[in-house]
């Protein structure tokens, strides 16, 4: 028999456990930076407003209010005029991952003003 947890029980962590890490963190090739900036996804004839929650030279995590299918081609607009082509790599709740189509070195050149140096060091662009 499975006991349903109350909201208090769900958020309490047993003492001595390490803090929960991002499940994808150890699989990522490029470091990510946490951010909060407006973004807009354009796919087909739709414009979908969102909030970019993290960013790397390989892609972004963006919170949106619409469901998008994995593999959908999108353009991500940030900072009013900068855009990146990519595709939806994953969906989880109200967030989606966009994987950029350009090489990370090219993305780093464009995003140097947005990304911390730690996200650029290993590319030789810092």
Image (cartoon, helix red, strand yellow):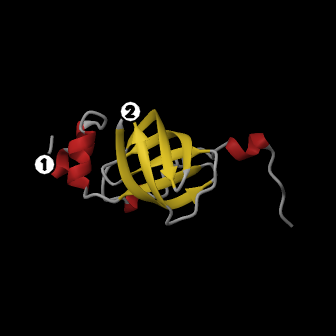
Compared across the picture, whether 5 is left or right of 56 comes to right
Residue at image mark 2: 79
Seen in the picture, residue 49 relative to 86 is either above or below; the reply is above
Compared across the picture, whether 31 is left or right of 72 comes to left
Residue 33 placement (x, y as % from top left): 37, 41
Seen in the picture, residue 121 relative to 90 is either above or below; the reply is above
Per the image, label 2 sits on a secondary structure element best described as loop
Residue at the (83%, 63%) spot, across then down: 2
Q: Earlier in the sequence, mark 2 or mark 1?
A: 2
Seen in the picture, residue 90 relative to 53 is either above or below; the reply is below
Residue at the (63%, 55%) spot, across then down: 67
Per the image, label 1 sits on a secondary structure element best described as loop
Residue at image mark 1: 124
Residue 60 placement (x, y as % from top left): 42, 49
The quarter in which the N terminus is drawn is bottom right
Residue 22 placement (x, y as % from top left): 48, 52
Residue at the (72%, 46%) spot, across then down: 10
Q: Nearer the viewer, mark 2 or mark 1?
A: 2
How many neighbours does mark 2 have within 10 angstroms: few (below 14), some (14-19), or many (20 or more)?
few
The quarter in which the C terminus is drawn is top left
Residue 60's mark? none
Residue at the (30%, 54%) spot, across then down: 30
Q: Nearer the viewer, residue 1 or 83?
A: 83
């Amino acid at each position: 028999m499975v006991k349903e947890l109350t909201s208090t029980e769900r958020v309490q962590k047993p003492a001595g456990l390490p803090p929960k890490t991002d499940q994808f963190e150890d699989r990522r090739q490029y470091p990510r930076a946490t951010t909060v900036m407006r973004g807009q996804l354009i796919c087909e004839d739709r414009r979908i407003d969102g909030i970019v929650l993290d960013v790397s030279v390989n892609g972004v995590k963006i919170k949106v209010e619409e469901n998008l299918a994995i593999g959908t081609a999108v353009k991500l607009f940030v900072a009013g005029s900068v855009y990146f082509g990519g595709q939806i790599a994953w969906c989880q709740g109200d967030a989606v991952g966009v994987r950029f189509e350009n090489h990370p070195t090219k993305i780093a050149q464009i995003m140097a003003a947005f990304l911390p140096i730690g996200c650029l060091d290993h590319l030789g662009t810092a």
